[in-house]
Image: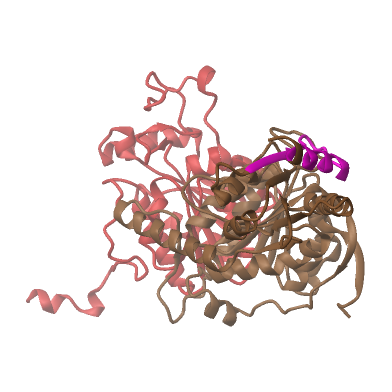
Chain colours: A red, B brown
Amino acid sequence: METKDIITPENKVYSAPRLLNDSTMHYCPGCSHGVVHKLVAEVIDEMGLEHNAIGIAPVGCAVFAYKYIDVDWIEAAHGRAPALATAAKRLNPDRLVFTYQGDGDFAAIGTAESIHAANRGENIAIIFINNGIYGMTGGQMAPTTLEGVKTATTPYGRNVELNGYPLDISRLMAQLDGTCYVTRQSVHKPAAVRQAKKAIRKAFENSINRRGCSVVEILGTCSSGWKMTPHQANLWMEEHMKEKYPIGDLKNNVE
Amino acid sequence: MSKEVRLMKGNEAIAHAAILYGVDGYFGYPITPQSEVLETLEAEMPWNTTGMVVLQAESEVASINMVYGGAATGKAVMTSSSSPGISLMQEGISYLAASELPALIVNVMRGGPGLGTIHPSQSDYFQATRGGGHGDYHLIVLAPASVQEMADFVALGFDLAFKYRTPSMILADGVVGQMMEKVVLPEPRPRRTEQQIAEQCPWAATGHSAGRKPNVVTSLELDSALMEKNNERFQETYRLIERNEVRYEAYHTDDAEYLIVAFGSIARICLKAIEDAREKGVKVGLIRPITLWPFPYDAIREASKHVKGILVVELNAGQMIEDVRLAVADPNMKIRHFGRMGGIVPNPSEITTALNLIMTNE
């Protein structure tokens, strides 16, 4: 049997998402953003929302998200994506409006916008990547950095007396009356990726069906910032981050 | 029906004019002395009539970023605030300018710096006319002197913003925002349809990309050569605006021996001082810039050729006077400033005294 005889439609088990274009990604090897981008692109395509979606890109490592996924995008100022999304959705109520934000964007500089958009029950989906570090600016402390972890701005480890406590903002989000769905997922194993995809789909459905604000937190790895190999980073995330940030639904009002 | 003459505050006129213009969205945060804009919109409930979205945001930072998000989808969106709130918005305004988005921002100025006072001022002239935030950009800045102009400049501000794809600002002072006057509101206009928005704003991230490539609205460009090109394009737009959109009013400049330059509410107080001077046989004229950017440099230079002195009257420590000096560009011309600060509005006799000073001493 020749190779060309094997490459047939009935033998196809996987292909790149149609909406994920061929631009070379700027993400580091082992970074979780690539996987989450793939999931976002797949879900939009599978829901048939290619021509009905507005994405809001953050400031941080995912600042160029708009280069990779072929839908309409708006690039926000640092932390303000939920404010942009609020207006985009209210003015275009039948569209899928989602933000894609990191921990610095969503849980530090943008905390006010995050909490108030969620508390108003804006019909938006928030994809929140928590890798516990500022990757884009060179590995500084994030609001979610765990106690004791060394970063460029906590060279002796995060000391809660100096730097305060790691912020579990999703737990806060789940307390707000305006959120309908708050979940925490990861993408470090195939089974986790499948779960994360389901969560993203649910959040996008909630935006389209105007059920309130959805937050999908995804525990990410940052091998460059953590100074680990991708494999070590996955193990470290599994061992350390899940204790402070357990995987699973924190709230689900939409069954 | 809309030829009906009504009595209202300048801030209320802004709100009514916005609904009648067919504005798609207003996002704002309360601050004195402009809260009546948001209050009037909430009371009018335009979402039931025109479909206009009105939202009280959690901060001015959120307001301007809502404006950014709405404008990026091609909608006609606006916000209003007063000086400290406008300072908070500057990052967002810079993003609007950099992303070439049309939007309207209303600043009903109060006295600063800092928390300052809730009383009227014009001390944000530099901030408004020089861009205000980071980067090389300008806003189209309109300075109303009456409640009628507050109403009229909503349409003008949006028309110019969409024509040039740049944010515009109504720079009012607390007097114009708070005083009640007669006003004739504009004829109602329907909001644009999705089809019209797609035709007028082919760049917009409407989320309805069928039949075209995805649109991305961004101010980011890491390639310096391309970023310089973007800047050159912005500057070309600004030169075009400078050529086409200068607006001002001139009173008695033909025979004037002395010239007053003033904008906004204080220009009307100057008119009273001019009337008093002319009764005494002193020929004083007035130029009232309506666009503070683009500034009427040529008109002031022309008017200055026949006068013995120029008095610039402002509710600040002397800001527009720098543009008047640039316009006149004559070191021998007597150009003096008279201003009150901290929320004090002078009466005509104080302006007369300032005029007398310029006439009697060097």
Q: Position of residue A234 (x, y in %)?
A: 33, 40
Q: Residue furthest left?
A: A2
Residue plotted at (37% across, 21% down): A155
Residue closest to the eye, B350 or B70: B350
B348 in magenta:
yes
Residue closest to the eye, A238 or A77: A77
Q: Is residue A185 above or below residue B197?
A: above
Can residue A92 be seen in this snapshot? no
Which quadrant: the N terminus of chain A?
bottom left
Residue plotted at (89% across, 54% down): B279
Q: Is residue B266 above or below residue B74?
A: above
Q: Position of residue B247 (x, y in %)?
A: 65, 64
Q: Is residue B223 above or below residue A143?
A: below
Residue plotted at (89% across, 80% down): B1
Q: Which residues are magenta?
A: B334-358
- Count the marks: 0
Q: Position of residue B221 (x, y in %)?
A: 37, 54
- Which image quarter: residue A157? top left
- Which image quarter: residue A125? bottom right
Residue plotted at (77% across, 63% down): B149
